[in-house]
Each structure stands twice: as structure tokens, then as C-alpha cells.
Image (cartoon, rainbow, N blue to C red):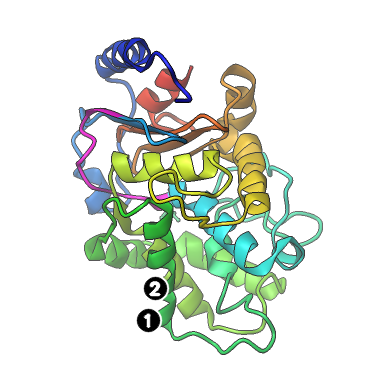
């Protein structure tokens, strides 16, 4: 086993858990009602090692939407399906140093944050002569990928969140139009379809267990430790971890890399997906966010 004295190790994890539990700082995202209604004391920690040792404490079966914590997965899926050359025609690697929803492109007119990765791929980025997927097929296709990454753990879709995200999307639309004007998207696909797909993927529902297995798959070179399936290729998994390391925690990424030194990705629902390469995946979930948009308890636990 990769962690031989698992019981001692768990004692430390539990201790961290309770230390963070009493921290009541932070503010829950309230731009849509489905996020605003999370209880501030929700706090769950799940971990899964690359040989399948599992541990969970707290609200680890409570469902939440994946939001931005899914972006590394989208990036990994795109890399695995299309290869690095095609993906990096559209996606840059340099952290922007800007808020995740800021209206900026880098000098190359490439997207710098991982913000809109999923909007770009497959039906739109698809190989030249691959048949176009219908929007329904695209949704099935990505959920199957997510399910495989999670080794069959809980995955759902929160339609209310999707509808709200689409309602409250002025900023995302502004970014989308700006990108379209600057030819950041391949020719195929309408902006409306691309945006809808983005909101759908943000609205996929998971729990701590799900994310911990997904993170373990990334820790394990793209092979899900529960099923043994190679879900994304190992080069893709490596590139995902590089980008998580440099820009997974919004404008706290530099400090996080310095203090914690692990690839991680946070999201507006309060999820933090953390990877310890070749060891394990961890999910930390607690809705109250700090000024950067990272979960307060998630960051405290990591530090
Ligand atoms: N749905 C959110 C948005 O695009 C996701 C952002 C996030 O998790 N930071 O605005």
C-alpha cells in the first residue's frame, strides 16, 4: 500500500478536519440561489489513494455542483482526445494573474485561464472530418467520461443550477463574444451551444467521494484506481497537473504553490480538488469562500 500506516495517517486527517470545522470565516457565493442555499457549516473531506485506500469524514455524500473544479478534467479530456498540438492552438499555459472572469485574452488571443476550456472542445475543436455531435450526444459523451474518471461514484445533473447559470450569464456571454470576435473558437458550433454546454458541465453534480476518485485518477497517470481503466492518457494527466499547479487556485495560485506545493483546483461551490501525484486524490468541500473565491476551510486544510 502506498500509505502503509493508514490508521495513523487518518488520525492526522481527522485532526485537521476538526481544526478547520470551527473556522466560520468566508462567504457563500450568492449570484444564483442554488449556490446561496448551501449551509455554511457543510464540511467534508474524502481521500482515495492510487491503490484504492479510501477515507471520508464529514458531509462527504452531500451533493454539490462541480463548477470550476471540473475544468482540469475538461482540459485532460480535450488533451487526451485531440492531442496537445490542437488543444494548445486555442489554450495558453501562462497564468493570467487576473480574476477568472476578467475580459482579457493574452497577446496571442489565447485563453489564459482554464475558465472556458470546456467550451472549446470536441464538437467545436473536433478533428476536421469527425462528424459533428448533437448537443444531446455531447452531454452523454462528457458524462460518460466523468463517470469513468470517478470509477462509477455518484454523478448527477442539477437542472436548476444549469437554468440559473444560463440566466445569470451576462459576463460569461461577454467573454464568449469577445473570444469569438478574436477567433478563439474553431469554426464549428454556435456560441449559444457552446455556452449551454459550458453551463451544463458546470452543473454536473458530484459529492466528495466522486471528486476524490477523480483526483486519484489524475494522481495515477490517468488510470482510475478503482476500476483500473486508463481514462485519459498519461501525458494529458501530466499537463493537467502542471496547469493546476500554476493556476488552479485563482489569484492565490502563486502563494498556494509556494505554501502547499500541490496541484489543486477550486470552484465556486466550495470544492477543492487536490492531487498528491503518485499518492492520492483529495476532495475538500465547504461552501464559504475567501476573497479570491477559494473555499476558506479547503485552503486552511491544505496549508
Ligand atoms: N459557473 C461559474 C461561472 O462560470 C463557475 C465559476 C467558478 O466556479 N469559479 O461563472
250 or 145: nearer the eye?
A: 145
Say which residue appears at 56% left-offset and 20% top-offset.
Answer: 260
- Vertical placement of residue 85 versus 247, above or below: below
58 on left or right of 176: left
CA gap between label 1 and label 2 equals 5 Å
- Vertical placement of residue 77 versus 295, above or below: below
107 or 231: nearer the eye?
A: 231
User: Would you identify the image quadrant in which residue 165 lies?
Assistant: bottom left
173 or 65: nearer the eye?
A: 65
- Vertical placement of residue 146 versus 245, above or below: below
82 on left or right of 227: right
Say which residue appears at 48% left-offset and 45% top-offset.
Answer: 217
Q: Answer yes or no: is residue 169 visible.
A: no
Residue with the most extreme right position: 107
Tell me the number on the disc at residue 136.
Answer: 1
Q: Is residue 187 magenta?
A: no
- Location of mark 2 (residue): 139
Quadrant containing the N terminus is top left
Numbered disc 1: secondary structure: helix
Estimate the x, y position of residue 258 in percent, counting from the top left: 64, 20
Q: Which residues are magenta?
A: 55-67
Estimate the x, y position of residue 54 in percent, counting from the top left: 32, 31
Numbered disc 2: secondary structure: helix
Estimate the x, y position of residue 298 in percent, counting from the top left: 39, 27
Say which residue appears at 47% left-offset and 71% top-offset.
Answer: 195
Mark 2 and mark 1 in contact (Cβ < 8 Å)? yes
Q: Is mark 2 within 8 Å of ligand 1?
A: no
**Label total for image:** 2
256 or 15: nearer the eye?
A: 15
Tell me the number on the disc at residue 104.
Answer: none
Question: Badge 2 local density, few (<14 within 10 Å), some, or many (20+)?
Answer: some
298 on left or right of 108: left
Amino acid at each position: 500500500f502506498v500509505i502503509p500506516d493508514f490508521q495513523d495517517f487518518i488520525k492526522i486527517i481527522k485532526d485537521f478536519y476538526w481544526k478547520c470545522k470551527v473556522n466560520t470565516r468566508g462567504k457563500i457565493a450568492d449570484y444564483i440561489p442554488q449556490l446561496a442555499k448551501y449551509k455554511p457549516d457543510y464540511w467534508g473531506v474524502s481521500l482515495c489513494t492510487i491503490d484504492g485506500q479510501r477515507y471520508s469524514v464529514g458531509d462527504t455524500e452531500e451533493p454539490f455542483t462541480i463548477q470550476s473544479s471540473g475544468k482540469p478534467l475538461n482540459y485532460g479530456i480535450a488533451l487526451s482526445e485531440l492531442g496537445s498540438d490542437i488543444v494548445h492552438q486555442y489554450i495558453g499555459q501562462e497564468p493570467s494573474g487576473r480574476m477568472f472572469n476578467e475580459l482579457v485574452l493574452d497577446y496571442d488571443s489565447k485563453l489564459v485561464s482554464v475558465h472556458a476550456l470546456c467550451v472549446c472542445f470536441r464538437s467545436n475543436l473536433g478533428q476536421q472530418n469527425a462528424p459533428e455531435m448533437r448537443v444531446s450526444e455531447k452531454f452523454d459523451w462528457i458524462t460518460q467520461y466523468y463517470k469513468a474518471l470517478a470509477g462509477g461514484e455518484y454523478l448527477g445533473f442539477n437542472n436548476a443550477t444549469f437554468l440559473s447559470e444560463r440566466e445569470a450569464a451576462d459576463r460569461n456571454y461577454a467573454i464568449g463574444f469577445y473570444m469569438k470576435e478574436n477567433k478563439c473558437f474553431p469554426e464549428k458550433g454556435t456560441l449559444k451551444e457552446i455556452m449551454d454546454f459550458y453551463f451544463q458541465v458546470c452543473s454536473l453534480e458530484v459529492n466528495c467521494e466522486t471528486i476524490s476518485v477523480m483526483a486519484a485518477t489524475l494522481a495515477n497517470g490517468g488510470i482510475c484506481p478503482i476500476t483500473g481503466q486508463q481514462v485519459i492518457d498519461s501525458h494529458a494527466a501530466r499537463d493537467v497537473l502542471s496547469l493546476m499547479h500554476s493556476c488552479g487556485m485563482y489569484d492565490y495560485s502563486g502563494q498556494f504553490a509556494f505554501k502547499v506545493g500541490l496541484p489543486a483546483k477550486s470552484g465556486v461551490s466550495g470544492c477543492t480538488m487536490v492531487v498528491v501525484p503518485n499518492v492520492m486524490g483529495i476532495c475538500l468541500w465547504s461552501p464559504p469562500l475567501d476573497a479570491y473565491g477559494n473555499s476558506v476551510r479547503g485552503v486552511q486544510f491544505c496549508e
